[in-house]
Image (cartoon, rainbow, N blue to C red):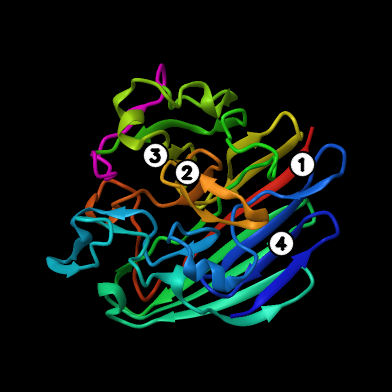
Amino acid sequence: MEVFKIGNGTLDATITNYGARLMSLIVPDALGIKKDIVWGFPTPEEYKEADELYYGATIGRMANRISGASFKINGEKYQLEPNDFPNHLHGGKNGFHNRIWEVIGQGVDFVTMFLHSPSGEGGYPGCLDIQVKYRITENNGLKISYQAQADRNTPINLAHHSYFNFTGSESWDILQHILKINADYYTPIHESGIPDGSFKNVGNTPFDFRSQKFIGAQIDSDHPQIKMGKGYDHNFVLKKENSSEIILAAEAFEPLSGRMMQVWTNQPGLQFYTSNFLSGKDVGKNGKSYTARSAFCLETQHFPDSPNKPHFPSCFISPDESYNYSCEYRFTHL
């Protein structure tokens, strides 16, 4: 396992090829004071020993949940690992987050990694060749670019799974962070976390982040979807004119530090998760226990259970098409 440091003098990141994970992201506040704003561990080895909560990982082949841990292509059923019984979650126990990626390019401000996934791995059909590139941009963004090619029809949904807290270690919840999401609709879930297939308008619900709102404002609402997710753990349908358009998906702001993050992507969905299942068992950087609601995730991706819901944006690729998506976390301060 290797560790790489990239940066531009303002924004600095540490990345390991174990799971193509972001280990740290050092961001200045309004006074220029730099702090690490992502949860994780000092060494790659500690990620292997921790509870698997996907800290900073590249998730694949399929991010999020697949109902019944199975799907069909042209009537043929493919059985996956039910690691979130009875469903499949984040590619299974041996998903891309637990693989050693090959480093194929690196520089002062970027690192590029490659992974080959053979046909049948995790139950998925077809060989898949993947590249993930982390790059620090001139406008103080961390851009994550995904490319993949398959030799037969197969689903793919890559996502980044960092847990953010813009105060660093100063505050141990994110309820006073302010969030805005560019979405009129979200996909409600069943008890198991699988979308029920509908699109619900966010209006007059705790899911309305179309204007800036404190994350904690309605996180303990009696809304059945909030109770089901133990907070927010839901996919938002991003407002896009076309499938390839790169849009501003979300903005997050923390008033005390002044740190602000924009999320730019050409993916169709955004999973907003308030670390509801962090138990405090994992002790990370600076000897701190990671607890529920101590961080949040904004994961750009295809919708959960897309292989089983034809009316969702398709996550399948064929040998004659490429998978090309990106997510950029762009930072500034007020």
Q: Is residue 146 visible?
A: yes
> How far separated are the C-alphas under marks 4 and 2?
22 Å
> How far separated are the C-alphas under marks 1 and 2?
24 Å
Q: State the predominant SS element of the stretch in magenta.
A: loop
Residue 43, image x, y percentages? 62, 70
Q: Residue at x 46, y 24 (%)?
A: 208
Q: First in sequence: mark 4 or mark 2? A: 4
Residue 199 in magenta? yes
**Counting other residues with Cα less than 10 Å from the Cα at mark 1, is it few (<14), some (14-19), or many (20 or more)?**
some
Q: Secondary structure at mark 4?
A: strand
Q: Amino acid at mark 2?
A: Ser
Question: Looking at the image, which residue sits at the far top?
Answer: 204
Specify the label residue 234 is tagged with: 3
Marks 1 and 3: in contact by CB < 8 Å?
no
Q: Residue at x 39, y 74 (%)?
A: 320
Residue 299, image x, y percentages? 50, 49
**Counting other residues with Cα less than 10 Å from the Cα at mark 3, is it few (<14), some (14-19), or many (20 or more)?**
many
Q: First in sequence: mark 1 or mark 2? A: 2
